[in-house]
Image: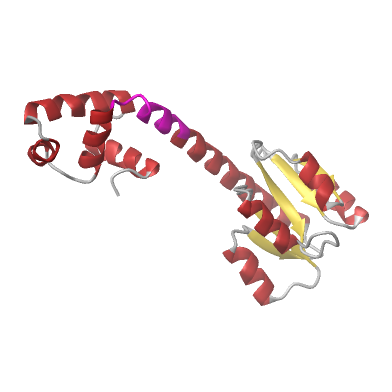
Amino acid sequence: MSPPAGIVYLLDDEPEMVKALSRALRAKQFEVRGFTSVFAFLESFRPQDTGCLVLDVAMPELDGLELQRRLTREGILIPIIFLTGHGDIPMSVSAIKAGATDFLTKPVEAGTLARAVRAALELAETRRQTIAETAALAARFATLTRREREVMEHVSAGHLNKQIAFDLGTGEQNIKIHRAHVMKKMGVNSLADLVRAAGRLGIGK
């Protein structure tokens, strides 16, 4: 089975560890970019690419947990697999709570690492698709008129046409027309789809 598309960023301050893990992952057909410096990684890393990060906890420049926090603050939600030779339960719990996908202890078996990387890349692709779909919905929403946006907000909140017409000071037939326009512009075929789209955009809450 071919690996998921995406880049595996490998960050460990031990050059031999980087070489060994890179070799093991490339043998499984993953695309790997290895680094021994946090700052070299940050300079090379492109957030727009689908990828995951295999990260040593004990980095001399910036420890792994702090790098995780920094990426999160910058809105970069790359899946992270932590590696450590001396990790403990509180550290792993902290990492997982902060969004890490896995926490593995060195020396890690190649198959275990490959499975963790596969899962992380699949998660990264799912996130990429979700972001793209939300952006497409936002672009469609931007084409709505002010009144159509008002109608969409009311509809997604579960209001009936009669109630919406009363709230907006117009006729029920006008609301039906606006609803039809909203459905067409948003590219949805059912009320359930419209409500889901509104939820993705934070509308009607």
Instruction: Give residue 80's position: percent from left, percent from top.
Output: 67, 54
Question: Is residue 136 in the magenta section?
Answer: yes
Residue 79 sits above or below residue 203 on the image: below
Q: Give the quadrant of residue 8.
A: top right
Which one is in front, 53 or 67? 67
Instruction: Give residue 25's position: percent from left, percent from top.
Output: 78, 46
Residue at 57% in and 47% down? 123
Residue 104 sits above or below residue 86 on the image: above
- The furthest residue to the front: 169
What secondary structure characterizes most of the magenta part?
Answer: helix
Instruction: Give residue 31's position: percent from left, percent from top.
Output: 76, 38
Question: Is residue 174 in the magenta section?
Answer: no
User: Which span of residues is magenta-colored?
Assistant: 135-145
Image quarter (top left, top right, bottom left or bottom right) of the N terminus:
top right
Q: Is 30 placed left or right of 192 in the picture? A: right
Residue at 75% in and 39% down? 29
Residue 87 sits above or below residue 108 on the image: below
* Residue 187 in view here: no
Residue 60 sits above or below residue 176 on the image: below
